[in-house]
Image: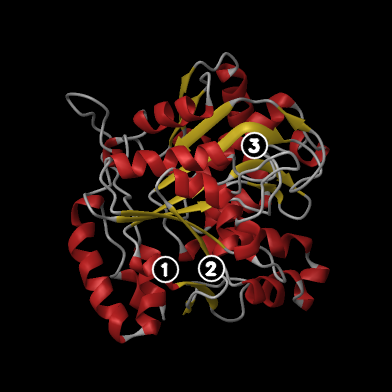
Amino acid sequence: MTRRDVKNLRPASPADSGARLATRRDVLRGSLAAGAALATGVGCGASDDQGKASEGPAPIERIPLGQVTLVRAETPEAAVARALELTGALSFIQPGQRVVIKPNFTGPVAPPDTTHPEVLAELVRLCLAKGAGEVIVAERAFAGSNTEYLLGWPLYQSATKSLRDYVEEAGGRALALDDEPWVEFELPGDVDFDRPIRIPRLLAEADHLINAPALKTHEIAVFTMTLKNLFGYVHPDDRQQLVHQHPLSAGDPDRVKRMFAQMNLAFSPTLNVLDALVSRTTKGPVGGDQADTNLILAGRDRVAVDAVGLAILKVVGSEPWIMDKPVWQQVQLAEAVRRGIGVRGPDDVTLAGEGVAELAEIERALRAV
């Protein structure tokens, strides 16, 4: 697929997405190549209308694009429910639609190394309550692993329930993408990728994608939140051959960070829900120090959400390469801005906090240059 092929297939707003999605499915039946381009248009919802609804929660298209909602509540379920209420109350879901949720699932280990299972279960329940016909929590773990096996394994050493149990008890379906169909997508522009990437065909068959990562540091990416989380929807062979093991990556450490941002051109989540109940503050993505930040973040814009996540790490204390560099100078975030994936800088971000005593500190860290 070329840039021109992709351009006219992105829905401009939720108002016109229904008709275009019907077209996507028709095309997909006849062409896998077309399906690859269509996957990028799932749930784009990118309206700049920032008006307010007269009654009840504003529809998501009326939430400012750069608004990030931060909620602290007594339980994970309450925090998720309130954060979503303040971010459009899942107003984009129409009866019978299929919703895909992308967790951060590195295996059957405890948060913050994976998205909290109660966060995912509550997302499933809320989507179904809104009228979704099917909610799929889909993942493909790292190369060489058996995702199907990992989804069914008890999550923690003392636990009896697997991620599959949490998802299915909430009414959803846990899907391992290992043996599912993948389609090629050619990233537009002058990117570091030297050939197309493969992404799940499932995305072209869904109506909405909800991106639900955990807040963590990362030894390669510096941080892994909403942008980096979608790397799990790049085929594991492409992750290795085009990114981690590519000869150019050895001589340019920033190349991989740029690529984590660039591959986001293939995805358009409707909503991003960042699990910061417990945050990995050092030596991520697995192991190291952690902080009980007790927050759920929600927003339409990946760049805005990740910028606020970085500000949280600065407030609670993290690695020197996070503490000593302004948020907007991080390579992964700066590349996402340069590629037009999200907001352009701190002036485009607004915070909406509830129960967050340290909101002013987070804002100062977000806006420091």
Gap in Å between the C-alphas at discs 2 and 3? 30 Å
What colour scheme does the image use? secondary structure
Mark linked to residue 202: 1
The quarter in which the C terminus is drawn is top right
User: Label 3 sits on what residue type?
Assistant: Leu
Q: Position of residue 319 (x, y in %)?
A: 80, 37
Q: Are marks 1 and 2 in contact (CB under 8 Å)?
A: yes
Left or right: residue 251 compared with residue 326:
right
- Determine the residue located farthest toward the front in the rendered image: 160
Give the mark, 1 or 2, whose residue is nearer the N terminus. Answer: 2
Q: Secondary structure at mark 3?
A: helix
- The residue under the point 32% across, 44% down is 128
Q: Secondary structure at mark 1?
A: helix
Between 137 and 199, the one nearer to me in the picture: 137
Give the mark, 1 or 3, whose residue is nearer the N terminus. Answer: 1
Gap in Å between the C-alphas at discs 1 and 3? 31 Å
Residue behind mark 2: 177
| Image quarter of residue 25 | bottom left
- Residue 65 at least partly seen: no
Residue behind mark 3: 310
| Image quarter of residue 130 | top left
The quarter in which the N terminus is drawn is bottom left
Give the mark, 2 or 3, whose residue is nearer the N terminus. Answer: 2
